[in-house]
Amino acid sequence: MSFSRSSTVTLGRENAPNHQHQSEEDHSRPEPINLDLLDEDRVDPFPKRLLIAVDFGTTYSAVSYVDVPQGCPSDSVDSRSIRSIGNYPENYNYHYNDPMGLEVPTEVIYPLDRHFRDHFNLDNPEEPPENGDRVEVQAPDEDGDISMLSDMSEEFRWGYRVHEVWNRPSTHSNTTNQPLSRFKLLLDNSEMTQSVRRDVSQTINTLKRRHVIQGPLHVIADFLTYLLEHTRSQLRRQGFDDSYEKEMVLCVPAIWTQKACRDMQACLAAAMKRANFTRADLQNKSIDNLFIVSEPEAAAAHMLSTSAEIKSGDCFVLLDAGGGTVDANTYRVSREEPLRLETEIVAPGGGLHGSSYLNEGFREYLEDLLAEETYLNDGTETIHGIVERITFEEFEKRIKRGFDYRQQRPRKEIYIKGLRDNPAKGFRNECIYVPKQKIQEIFFRHLDAIVEIVKSQLEEARGKGYTVGKVVLIGGFGTSISLSQRLKEFLEEYGREHNCRVTLMEPQQGFVSQGKYLNAAD
């Protein structure tokens, strides 16, 4: 695979070890993006253009952009000018100012239909309509990689269109529907993600056997196709037509190998070609003006440029608590102005303790509780469907987001039509009565693991003679009241034990989705 014009300035490492056991010798941190490189080798060095960052996340994804006027260099970007794509199809769950409205679930549902990719238009691919419901894609290449093109029918769902049907019994009883999530982790071959990759691969293999896809990269490319087509539609509505040059920034985990980065670039190239987004060479799987940046480095650089709380010479832990993974990186800030990340003090840490694993814990609890209630299986209604609906409608939307383990709350009542009384299980009046202690247990399984990740970073830094003064909490899970409180309690305990003060910096509203990668400059 080729990379255009030094486009991938930050790549992963080959044979990268897992998060917890990476030696200092093996760890070579990617360099932050240098926006000056975007201004080289132009006939007109400063045409009007858009800088567009794609944050392909494990559970949610986002796209940010900034308009750079003609005559202005890229390093003149003001973080206050950065905007995020919103208005995602079928997103009815969030109010206007909710930052989650600027992110879209990284989820798809495929129809289990062998004719799904039978319609080809190789010579004159159609212009995708503005609503992003239909996309024409290319024919299979020789090695069966990701350039397969299709007429994706309405049965294919992505983002909030998956959530739209998740509470319908038929979604879970109809075996021709194949939902997929967490497929980003297919690109991470570390031991940490092995169980997730195994679970996702079961659905991938089913889709391959039915000729719906040819491999896991198809899934990523299909999702990105719809994400970019929606992005293009929203940009055009804002007056940014195809006359604007586009500079692409792709955000990847620091732990990814070079192969994972190349695969991700190939997926993005295919998606851009399908969505008529910008110049992409499918044969060489390259993209004009693409820069790949490390997620933690970019987030830390953005935080430096927007926060006055981090000062020269400071050492801090950046804790990125997302939906899938929780990652920790510890940095030292330069003593010279302008402030820069001088070095990463210790090897990164992390684990599969993101907010989606709270859902998984609640789902397992319900499955065990209802396993013997086979009378609930009735037509399209199944125990599996009931569990999925309750996990999504009750736990995800109502319980999880505002749960505070310090508050005294009564048991949670969850209605299930036809549920028979069973006092031993807490079943009464067609309701499950979930004790607060059970929800606490689900939370603390992961809160305590996150505390251990932070503690490990602090201890390793301390062992090398560094004093860490702050833990900077970012990511969607970072808005959790319970996570924030548990970290504060731990940092107070740690400070008393070591006679020091470590404070918690909590996330700015919308930090994740509003351009942290576009401001990872200089």
Image (tube, rainbow, N blue to C red):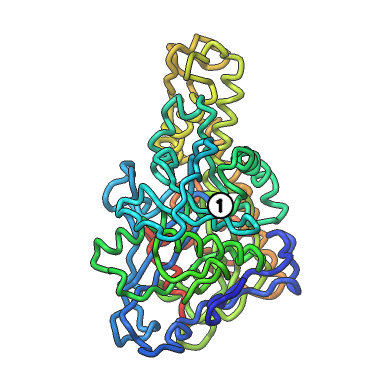
Q: Is 178 rendered above or below residue 132?
A: above
Q: In the picture, which quadrant includes the N terminus?
A: bottom right
Describe residue 292's horizontal placement relative to residue 512 as left or right. Answer: right
Q: Amino acid at mark 1?
A: His
Q: Label 1, on which residue?
A: 218
Q: Nearer the viewer, residue 47 or 319?
A: 47
Q: Is 438 rendered above or below residue 75?
A: above
- The x and y percentages for residue 291 are 51, 74
Q: Is residue 408 visible?
A: no
Question: Which element carries disc 1, helix, strand or loop?
Answer: helix
User: At x 65% / y 68%, what residue is drawn?
Assistant: 258
Q: Nearer the viewer, residue 329 or 164?
A: 164
Badge 1: residue crowd in 10 Å (few <14, some 14–19, many ≥20) = many
- The x and y percentages for residue 116 are 49, 41
User: At x 57% / y 56%, what residue is drawn?
Assistant: 146
- The x and y percentages for residue 187 are 63, 56
- The x and y percentages for residue 414 are 44, 23
Q: Nearer the viewer, residue 459 or 363?
A: 363
User: At x 45% / y 11%, what residue is drawn?
Assistant: 418
